[in-house]
Amino acid sequence: MTETQVQYQPQTEPPLSDWLKFLREEVRFEYNISAQRVAWFLTSQTFLISAFVLGYFNSNAIIAKDFFGQIIPMIGIISSLLLRVSIMVAHIRIWQHSRNLQRFHQEGLYDGLDDFLRNIAMLYPRIVPCLLLSTWIVILLTFGYPSPLKDLSPSFLFLVFFLILVVADIFLNKFERNDQLPSRTTT
């Protein structure tokens, strides 16, 4: 019996069209992940808000008011922060792939027309955690803990915290776009 020999073939770079398809699929994947995370987040927040409203306003016990006024808003704040971090990671990957797609635009293989739409599409998953984080902070300060801010209007508090979070998000956006994570280069 003879043995068949397997010849070793060094790996070569895939054609540019395959690399372009790969990048576009990666961007599409990250957008889908972001959308799924936001959908699940909104669903969970609906249950948390319902539990807060039903528990806090239908209970006369001090312990229940403490639980519903403090613990549930803290869960909402933590989940909002975690979602924001996961969305930020997905957007970092999208910007990395976008930089590579811009190279294809310079070579005439990619039109780049959807860059504006990509920026618009990124607004929703960025703003939703800020909105709900602001809401939970106001709920916590209004119903949870005695604080000097309790005398202020809840809508004013919401606006202040929302603006603070949006400004912080703008700075995070600059970090995401200027990250120095390694990206693939062709030789």
Image (tube, helix red, strand yellow):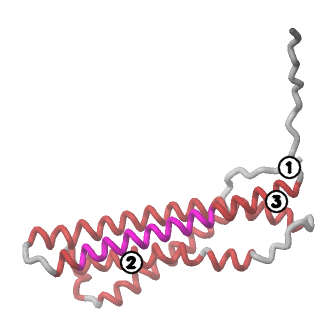
Q: How much space separates mark 3 and mark 2, taking CA atoms?
A: 39 Å
Q: Is residue 2 magenta?
A: no
| Outermost residue to the left | 61
Type of amino acid under label 1: Thr
Q: Nearer the viewer, mark 3 or mark 2?
A: 3
Q: Disc 2 marks which residue?
A: 134
Quadrant for the N terminus in the image: top right
Q: Secondary structure at mark 2?
A: helix
Residue at image position (38%, 68%) is 44
Classify mark 1: helix, strand or loop: loop
Q: Tell which circle, 2 or 1, labels the residue nearer the N-terminal end.
A: 2
Q: Mark 1 = which residue?
A: 186
Q: Position of residue 69 (x, y in %)?
A: 21, 73
User: Disc 3 residue type?
Assistant: Leu
Image depth: mark 1 or mark 3 in front: 3
In which quadrant of the rendered view does residue 76 lie?
bottom left
Magenta part mainly helix, strand or loop?
helix
Identify the amino acid type marked 2. Ser
Q: Is 178 placed left or right of 20 in the picture?
A: left
The percent coordinates of residue 122 (x first, y second) are: 61, 74
Task: From the viewer's side, name the closer residue of 22 and 71.
Answer: 22
Magenta stretch: give its range. 30-53
| Snapshot quadrant of residue 138 | bottom left
Q: Is residue 175 visible to the viewer in this orientation of the structure? A: no
